[in-house]
Image (tube, helix red, strand yellow):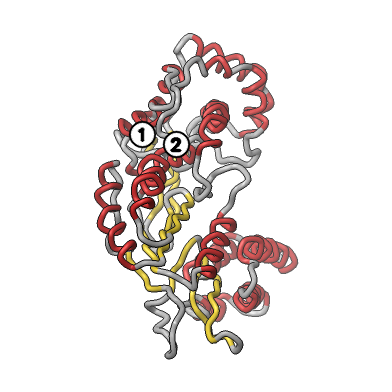
């Protein structure tokens, strides 16, 4: 994204009935309800009148979003991940504003950004990293983990970054109102000066705008021209890795990146961040515990090849296998009385979804292994199945 572009005003005029109709029809029919209990289907039955009310409230500056409903999900490490669910009405207006902002920002985002963008995906990011490493015979990898990224984005700095491009006070006020709406917990509304609610329609775009400024522009414009060798940044929202073919380059970026991100109110998790020598092995078999990286659900590693000695490969990561098995066990436990044929259909759907993402060249063994794990439940009782699940999380994982 260019650093010097004209600020845009009078954007709220595009919040027209036709724009809001398109935004409304784009709402997920199975989206979770907010604090008001209104479902998407109920809201859409009165879409025309809801559009009229939203336009009038925005025009007269009387629109006020409701707090989000908080739902907790377990992360891979067992810690809770809070997801904030706005009302369908608020999601509707957020989506309309997102469509306006997306048209402005999208043409200027860097190509190395893949998360929550039209016609881009995690699989594309996985392939770009794989191609670069294969072409450069591996490289030095800098893995950076950001602690609670969405929960810690400072509102004032986010609005400052957005304001560099967006000058429309109505749009800026709407964004701020969504950030400040708070969450409803035990009957009390909790507000904060930090955080872009996960579950908000506009939060991913706000996150991309923020990371574009905090990381992407800085790396491409300021750091890369000073590096001796070649380098690559691949980012999916807040999940990113940097690859270098020169160790000194990696070390210089490693020293600079933490202060840079902290300047934008972000916290680098030093325990999970690390550097990895992922160059092609020479001679002895490498210590796989030290010479692999996990990125977007895949493990990148070197495996012996009878023709060339070593080949860079990817496979489903251990965390991804564990996540799949946990979801499977939870699904079965939540449907204890489900008939066998219905259970088989549900398991087939889970396996199909897993394969849709992880079906890449060289990962066939892990996909077969996932199928064996999943369908073993049809023949095993709960006790022995749980043992199978525990064993499965370690098989094939580095």
Q: Position of residue 298 (x, y in %)?
A: 52, 67
Q: Secondary structure at mark 1?
A: helix
Q: Residue at x 47, y 71 (%)?
A: 138
Q: Residue at x 48, y 41 (%)?
A: 204
**Residue 338 in sight:** no
Mark 2 lies on residue: 206
Q: Mark 1 touching mark 2, by CB under 8 A?
A: yes
In the image, which disc is placed on residue 290? Answer: none
Residue 170 or 320: which is nearer the viewer?
Answer: 170
Above or below, 98 relative to 300: above
Tell me the crowding category of disc 1: few under 14, some 14 to 19, or many 20 or more residues within 10 angstroms, Cα based.
Answer: many
Instruction: Using residue 27 as the reference point, say whether residue 10 is left or right of it.
Output: left
The answer for how far apart the CA atoms under marks 1 and 2 are is: 8 Å
Residue at far top of view: 60
Instruction: Using residue 59 as the reference point, say whether residue 225 is left or right of it.
Output: left
Q: Secondary structure at mark 2?
A: helix
Residue 225 or 100: which is nearer the viewer?
Answer: 225
In the image, which disc is placed on residue 158? Answer: 1
Tell me the crowding category of disc 2: few under 14, some 14 to 19, or many 20 or more residues within 10 angstroms, Cα based.
Answer: many
């Amino acid at each position: 994204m260019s650093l010097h572009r004209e600020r845009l005003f009078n954007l709220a005029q595009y919040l027209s009935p036709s724009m809001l109709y398109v935004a409304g029809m784009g709402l997920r029919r199975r989206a979770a309800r907010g604090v008001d209990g209104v479902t998407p289907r109920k809201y859409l039955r009165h879409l025309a009148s809801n559009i009229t009310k939203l336009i009038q409230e925005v025009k007269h500056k009387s629109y006020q979003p409701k707090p989000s409903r908080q739902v907790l999900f377990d992360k891979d490490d067992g810690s809770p991940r809070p997801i904030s669910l706005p009302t369908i009405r608020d999601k509707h207006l957020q989506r309309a504003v997102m469509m306006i902002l997306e048209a402005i920002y999208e043409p200027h985002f860097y190509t190395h950004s893949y998360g929550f963008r039209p016609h881009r995906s995690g699989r594309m990011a996985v392939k770009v990293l794989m191609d670069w490493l294969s072409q450069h015979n591996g490289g030095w990898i800098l893995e950076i983990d950001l602690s609670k990224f969405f929960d810690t984005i400072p509102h004032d700095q986010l609005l400052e970054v957005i304001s560099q491009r967006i000058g429309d006070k109505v749009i800026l006020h709407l964004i701020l109102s969504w950030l400040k709406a708070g969450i409803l917990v035990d009957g009390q509304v909790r507000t904060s000066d930090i955080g872009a609610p996960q579950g908000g329609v506009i939060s991913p775009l706000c996150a991309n705008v923020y990371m574009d400024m905090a990381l992407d522009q800085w790396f491409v414009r300021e750091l890369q021209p000073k590096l001796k060798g070649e380098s690559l940044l691949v980012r999916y929202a807040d999940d990113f890795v940097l690859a270098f073919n020169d160790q000194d380059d990696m070390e210089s970026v490693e020293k600079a990146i933490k202060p840079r991100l902290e300047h934008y109110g972000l916290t680098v998790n030093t325990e999970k961040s690390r550097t990895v020598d992922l160059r092609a092995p020479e001679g002895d078999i490498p210590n796989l515990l030290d010479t692999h990286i996990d990125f977007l659900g895949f493990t990148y590693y070197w495996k012996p090849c009878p023709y060339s000695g070593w080949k860079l490969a990817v496979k489903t990561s251990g965390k991804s296998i564990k996540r799949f098995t946990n979801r499977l066990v939870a699904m079965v436990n939540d449907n204890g009385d489900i008939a066998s044929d219905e259970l088989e259909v549900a398991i087939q759907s889970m396996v199909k979804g897993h394969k849709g993402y992880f079906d890449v060249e060289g990962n066939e063994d892990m996909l077969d292994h996932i199928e064996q794990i999943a369908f073993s439940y049809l023949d095993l009782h709960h006790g022995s199945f749980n043992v199978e699940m525990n064993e499965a999380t370690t098989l094939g994982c580095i």
